[in-house]
Image (tube, rainbow, N blue to C red):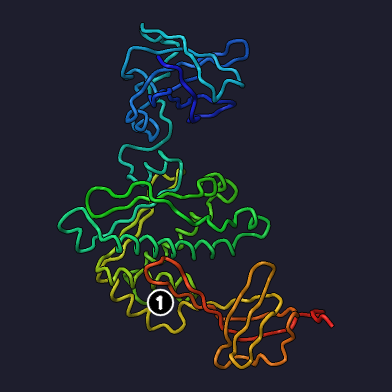
Amino acid sequence: MNAIMFTKVLLYCDGPQIVEAKDEIGGYYIALLVDDVEGRDRFLICGVRPQSLRSFRVGHIDLRRLILERPTLEWGLVTVDDDTVGSLLHPEVYTESIEEGFLPDSGFFLNELSHDVDDAAIKAHERNNLVLELVVEPPESAVGHRIHAETLAGLLVNFQTLIKHSYKRVIRSIPAELRSFLNRSDGHIMDVFVPAAAGSFAIWLESTDQEGAVIKANLLQESPLYQALDIVNEFFSCNESTSDTLRLARRYKGHLSGSYLRLLSFLKEANTGLEYSWATPHSLEKKFGKVSIDQVGRLVAALSGVSNLGIEEIELRGQVDKADSTGRSWRLRDGTTVYTGSVKDDGPDLDGIVIGDRYVFRCLERIESIEGTGKEQRSLYLVEREKLEGASND
């Protein structure tokens, strides 16, 4: 048996009880706490097949079977000091049968997952992270497991943008004392970890901010990303009813509804419907949603008829350093953040604004996607202005 290093605690109770380990050439091991030697933890060590370890982690096999079905007869014992965790360990090696006293009882599963739990929940438990699967059926997938590069890019960008604006909506609703702790600018971002799977073209993603998706959930029961995807579910759950979709879009009127319309418009152009499912490490089942190509066309037509659907009212505070009454353009500075915009057609005149003084600008913000870049372009239109008390530099 090679020297090993502990890599991940799978069960902790007053200390590590079950631990994953690896050797220097990538072999996998399981370590089980079996004894205490003068205050030092003693672990049973045995090699395991990667697929068997995965099956144990997601609840398909119990711990006793994992150990008894190890690929070699070798097993070992190692005594661990606190200062040796993370260092190479050299187990005492044995080849005879493992003593019954060292073996766990039958029926010990790492979690409560059943054998028929769907892939999203399994992957969430396996990766200890929030995971999301997207499935589309563009025309090119009918003749092979393929998708146009621009379709793949557009799908990821538009769905990620929908999550982003949903995430921002959630953050605004969080109590102020928690908002600064959880409000990460990249908390909504997800990474692709499996580019495709068999069947229709499928993509697997997981939270980039694993700490926010998993650990911070303990503060709120549900992390902001979890709650953001719940809002996404609201949109996809009412696709059968145009009137329900319109009511929801008006409820979330602004960038969130606008990003949903842009996603649907993309799906219409790509001639595909969409299915998705997602789960967290604390889930025993997935959440899911879908929209068919027929529904896409109907919903795009209905939502496109709602005036100013994607426009939000926002309030900006800062120091004015430009006010061009002829060109009807302005610039407002708040610390290192700079806002620029124009005046709404029926908006206020810029004459009389004192450069250098602080104002409140109430604006309409419109977001449009820049084709082929995945970026968004913001336009600000001044509706009302108000000078802040005590703002004059005179």
Residue 188: x percent and y percent? 49, 57
Residue at the far left in the pictured view: 143
Considering depth in this image, is 34 or 321 the residue closer to the camera? 321
Q: Is residue 61 above or below residue 193?
A: above
Q: According to the image, label 1 marks what residue?
A: 246
Residue 54: x percent and y percent? 36, 32
Residue at the far right in the pictured view: 394
Identify the amino acid type marked 1: Leu
Q: Quadrant of the C terminus?
A: bottom right
Q: Residues within 10 Å of mark 1 (few under 14, many from 20)?
A: many
Total of numbered circles in the picture? Answer: 1
Q: Is residue 376 above or below residue 349?
A: above
Q: Do we see residue 251 in this rendering?
A: no
Indicate left or right for 46 with 148 as reference: right
Q: Is residue 69 above or below residue 248?
A: above
Q: Do we see residue 166 in this rendering?
A: yes
Indicate left or right for 240 with 103 as reference: left
Q: Quadrant of the N terminus?
A: top left
Indicate left or right for 47 with 182 as reference: left
Residue shown at 60%/60% (left/top)? 174
Residue shown at 20%/64% (left/top)? 139
Residue 89: x percent and y percent? 50, 17
Considering depth in this image, is 293 or 5 the residue closer to the camera? 5
Residue shown at 42%/49% (left/top)? 206
Q: Is residue 339 above or below residue 207?
A: below
Residue 269: x percent and y percent? 28, 72
Q: Secondary structure at mark 1?
A: helix
